[in-house]
Amino acid sequence: MTSPYGFNANATADGEWWEGSWHDYSPAVTGSGTFGGYGDLALFDITDSFARAAQDRVVSVGTSASMMGGSARSYIDYTVPHLAPAVTWASSDPVVRNSDNSITLKWNAPALEYSAMCLEVSIDGGSWSQFAVLWNTATTYTWTECSADHSYQFRIRSNYLASYSAYDTCATVILMTPSMPKSISTAAAGGTNIDVTLDNPSPVATKVQYQISTDGGSNWGSVTDAPSTTAFQVSASGTVKIRVRNYNSTGVSDWLESGIIVTLCPPDPPTLISPSNSAVLTTGGSVTFQWRHNAPDGSAQTAAQLQYSTDGGSTWTTVTKSTEQSHTMANPWSAGTTVTWKVRTKGADASYGAYAQAFSFKVYSAPTVNITSPGATVTGMPISVSANYTDASGTCQAATVTLTQGGRKLYSESATPAATITASIDVDEFLPTNGESYTVTVTARSSSGLTASSNATFQVVYTEPPAGTLQVVNDDGTASLYATVDNTGADAPAVSISVARVQGGTPVPLITDGASGSGFVDNYAPLNTTYQYAVTTKAASGAVNTVYVDNIIKSDYWYVYWGDNAAKAKWNPENGGIQITRPSKTRVYYAGRRDPVSYDGHAVALTETPSWMFIDKAEVDAFVQLIEDGGRGVYKSCDGWVYHADFDLTLTPAYTAIGYYGGASLGITRIAGERL
């Protein structure tokens, strides 16, 4: 019967109560105890500790006793086992941190036999867990399952068969590099105070360090230890940023920055608005200095100091304002003076901010412009414009003449810059309406940078020429025009007559500044559609008189004109058609869309395919000639279409019909061309 450190032995005998004492046997064992019993039964209860051995050993233990004058002996063989030996940490650097991911452990090898070394770790002061069992005689081990932002403590014990030695716990606690705080929140706490609150779950941070920036994070102050790892207060003035990091004896974390906090502080330099660096002021008037208060803490301007200098900054004149961000004064400076000015402001803080970077401007005499013509009434063309320009501080660099009516610009041109600015507006540039009033404006710019302008209003009072007459003869799909004017007894005789076709949009000129009796053949007048001819007579004064003449050309033929040639044919109403498309339109289907996306180049294609009947061979030959000459011309249909086109011809001869030469299918595609 065995136990780790002693034994219990039982022996029996008949008889009465026995008493006895320990006796020594080999190997030498020393002990003490009692025994006793009744009759021939005796109970021995013996306990002792035996010295360790390098291996298991057998020990014989004997007892003797006196029993009613007699004696008895009892022997027990007891096996003393070899138990796991105690293990201790190395006396020098038992636990060494190599990095946040590596720790080396060192211990002393026991003198007695063992089976394995068992290593355990406590993370962040928590429960112990085994992470390595070494079935060899190693006395070092490098552990790589560690990581930053944790603390580690280790203990070790040996193993032999079913027994383990006692633990030896290393006193060294390894701290890894702390992580930075999880979040930072800041709040202005009045004046220049800022409350800082951290969410800081790092288990190894022994303190927090912080830095302050008063320029929004561009530059940082000294590193300072915070009084707490979770909440503290700092003081800083201006546009403030705070950054924090965790610290322990091993190292520091990365910085965590706050957002911007604005505390009470002097304002930034104000923004100067006017007069700007490019400004040129006139003498005699007033000057208004304007600026904008810039307060990072949001406080309104409570005071301002404006300074100006006329000697390049050697001496300054100071003007003090309160909440106003402008200052108006009579201009005290003569022409040619350069004025430098600057401003500084004050907000809720007791101190003024810095002065803004100074602006400079010059003072000049302003130029003047005086219109001498036209006068109040204009009775003829061209309209002559003349203006006198005077400038004590420079010369005229540019001039512009503009005509307006009711605020709407009708005409503008550049004039030659000179002491006398002149311009002539002819009838081909602007044709005023008789009886209307117009305003002419002359604007001039000086080499000093200042400008001047003047305007004059005049009324057009013309005597109109007599109205023209127009004779129109419609023949074979065209209109022959004959325009005349009767100047008999006219106060303002017509010096020319013009004719234009008017149909919807801009008039198309047919006769321009012709003499009385001018004629014209209008090949491109629309068929079977009412349109107008505008007949305009013009007097030497520029006055005009326009009348309108309605006209319609009726025809059952369709025409094609090219060069000096023409072809015609009658329509066969049983065939043909018109197709209008946008040939560059594309529809694209995209994944995930129910409907397609349409892309369009905006071009319009107009195609006709009429079928025509020919009465005589000359009609056929004309169309054949059209194709031979290139197949391009002007197409004019019975329903009023007139446009440039490409043509393709398909002939269908009729060989059996007397006096009938068959038909043709004409492919017509509209193309770009000049106005018709």
Image (spheres, helix red, strand yellow):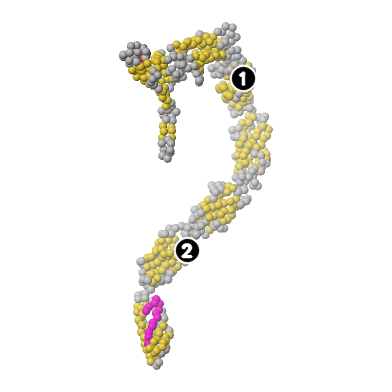
Residue 22 x, y percent position in the rendering? 40, 85
Residue displayed at 60% across by 16% down: 434
Magenta region: 1-13
Residue 566 x, y percent position in the rendering? 40, 14
Number of residues whose C-alpha sits closer than 10 Å to that of mark 1, classed few (under 14), some (14–19) or many (20 or more): some
Q: Earlier in the sequence, mark 1 or mark 2?
A: 2
Q: Closest to the observer: 43 or 606?
A: 606
**Residue 632 position (above or below residue 121):** above
- The residue singled out by tag 2 in the image is 126
Residue 8 lies in magenta, yes or no? yes
Question: How many labels were placed on the picture?
Answer: 2
Residue displayed at 56% across by 11% down: 467
Q: Which mark is residue 60?
A: none
Taking the view exactly as shown, the residue that stands out farthest to the top is: 488
Residue 613 x, y percent position in the rendering? 37, 16
Q: Name the main secondary structure of what is drawn in magenta.
A: loop
